[in-house]
Amino acid sequence: MPKSAKSKPLLSVVLPSYNEEVNIPITYNELTKNIDTTKFDYQIIFVNDGSRDGTWSEIEKIARKDSGVEGLNFSRNFGHHAALEAGLQQAIGDVVIMMDADLQHPPSLIPKLIEEWEKGCDIVNTVRLSTEDAGLFKNVSSRLFYAFMNTFSDLRLKDGEADYRLISKRALVTLNSLPEAPKFYRGLINWIGYDVARVEYVAQARMHGKSSYTLKKMIELARLGLTSFSMKPLKIIITIGMALTALSLLALVVMIGVKLFVNPEYFTNNAILIMFLVLMTGVLTTFQGIIAVYLVDIFNEAKGRPTYIVKDITKKRDE
């Protein structure tokens, strides 16, 4: 059971959870063990993101025994950022930590994160130096993700900087007040402009189960970060369009000049027309596709649908 909230400040820990049935009790034990070394009481919030195993049952078991543990159960899988948002909306701590429930975000870092926060920073990000069980594909794809984001978006993300971080109460209030959906927290953390400290770590090998962070989800994450924080793709479209217009005009002048003054048979009219149509069709299709990505985000936000739906909730600590 947590210690009295009257004598200690409160630490809220938000843990998105997807198919973590085996890891939930282990993560809980590790969390409480490390928080007990600090001056904080705790509010541990597990958010079950539509798991297909017994993750929710494990959360309920722990919540029944410990009033410091709360659980939110989504009606289906809404995604990692939706689970983070739900947990952050539920958090009431003086300080909040976001982390995964698979123990690859080591709870042993919690005292260090708190120590850095006490120096005056509103945000303490963690930087993963390496992952013990990561293969070549994981390492390469991770580096490509950060390189892509830093090149094509207005963000500057440090390689290995993920969603394991501590934020202050005022940073929590600021993030929760932002109306956009979905929320790309890696970008928003930098966007709000509060002082940031960093703590490095080596991620442990995953103890149980498989990572749910597939290549498809990584691509979607990059897409979300790009369209949420950058106008560069639209600027690139304008630049390419102007360049192609100039090159096409130059090419047409050359082709017509060759036909009129050099060799009328060198370029057939049909060949010129076909190549021009193929080029313009490809360019227009690409441009429309990129613009459509922005329009889809505007459309989804305009609909006003909730980011997530909570089906079940355990008893809150103040009830």
Image (tube, helix red, strand yellow):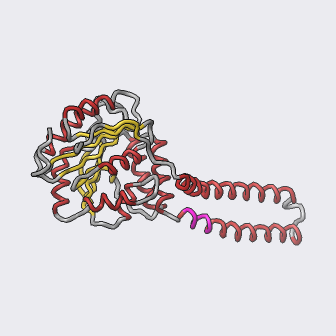
**Residue 284 quadrant:** bottom right
Q: In the rendered image, is residue 211 in sight?
A: no
Viewer-proximal residue among 260 and 30: 30
Find out whether residue 237 is within the magenta segment: yes
Q: Quadrant of the N terminus?
A: top left
The stretch of residues the image draws in magenta is 233-238
Residue 218 vs 265, above or below: the answer is: above
**Residue at (25%, 54%) from the top-left corner?**
166
Viewer-proximal residue among 117 and 310: 310
**Residue at (47%, 48%) from the top-left corner?**
306
Left or right: 138 in relation to 29? right
Q: In the rendered image, is residue 24 in sight?
A: yes
**Residue at (70%, 71%) from the top-left corner?**
246
Most extreme residue toward the front is 319
Q: Position of residue 213 (x, y in %)?
A: 41, 40
Viewer-proximal residue among 55 and 307: 307
Q: Position of residue 230 (x, y in %)?
A: 49, 63
Left or right: 195 in relation to 286? left
Q: Main secondary structure of the magenta part?
A: helix
Number of numbered discs visible in the structure rendering: 0
**Residue 134 quadrant:** top left
Q: Quadrant of the C terminus?
A: top left
Q: Position of residue 195 (x, y in %)?
A: 27, 66
**Residue 197 quadrant:** bottom left
Residue 217 vs 272, above or below: the answer is: above
